[in-house]
Amino acid sequence: MASISTKPPLVTLRLLLSEIRKSSSSKKLADNQMVQYIFSQYRKHQTTDQQLCKAIDEMHFKAKTYCDYLVNSRRYKEINADYKGKGERSVEETARMVGFKMPHEPKPKRN
């Protein structure tokens, strides 16, 4: 992955909004308070010709960290739902869960 300095803040903003969209139940992101706060912070720390914003790197780092947190939280929920303890499992089910196949038992030949 690219480092914070080479990855533009706009890409991080898009990733952040994408993760919020995946975790949000509402259709419109514009009504979400979290999105409104993120936009206000991005506008507040926006670098222009008239000002030099040294806090933009810190803001970008925080945004990237929060985006990583959202991605990993979603992945954790998916993995936890798949592998969560469901009581006693059969040998076949456990083998399938880790990607193995059980050997077939040969059928006895009849005379």
Image (tube, rainbow, N blue to C red):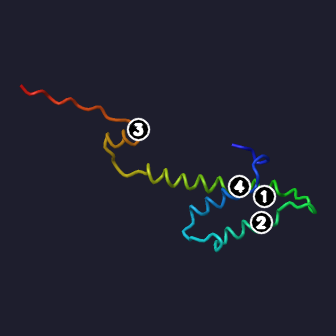
Q: Position of residue 62 (x, y in %)?
A: 74, 56
Q: Position of residue 87 (x, y in %)?
A: 35, 51
Could you give the CA–CA distance between mark 1 and mark 4, rounded to whole angstroms?
11 Å
Residue 108, above or below 40? above
| Kind of residue at disc 3 | Gly
Task: Name the quadrant containing residue 39.
Answer: bottom right
Q: Position of residue 105 (x, y in %)?
A: 23, 31
Specify few, some or many for label 4: CA neighbours under 10 Å numbering under 14, 14-19, or 20 or more.
Answer: many
Could you give the CA–CA distance between mark 3 and mark 1, rounded to whole angstroms?
42 Å
Specify few, some or many for label 3: CA neighbours under 10 Å numbering under 14, 14-19, or 20 or more.
Answer: few
Q: Which residue is mark 2?
A: 41
Whichever of labels 2 and 1 marks the residue nearer the N terminus, that label is 2
Specify few, some or many for label 1: CA neighbours under 10 Å numbering under 14, 14-19, or 20 or more.
Answer: some
Q: Nearer the viewer, residue 43 or 92?
A: 43
Instruction: Check the picture and name the quadrant holding the N terminus.
Output: top right
Residue at point 76%, 48% (across, down): 4
Whichever of labels 3 and 1 marks the residue nearer the N terminus, that label is 1
Identify the secondary structure beneath mark 4.
Answer: helix
Instruction: Judge depth for marks 4 and 3 and give the one in front.
Output: 4
Q: Give yes or no for contact between labels 2 and 3 (Cβ–Cβ under 8 Å).
A: no
Identify the secondary structure beneath mark 3.
Answer: loop
Q: Which residue is mark 1?
A: 59
Q: Which residue is mark 4?
A: 12
Could you give the CA–CA distance between mark 2 and mark 3, rounded to whole angstroms?
45 Å
Q: Give yes or no for contact between labels 2 and 1 (Cβ–Cβ under 8 Å).
A: yes
| Kind of residue at disc 4 | Thr
Instruction: Judge depth for marks 1 and 4 and give the one in front.
Output: 4
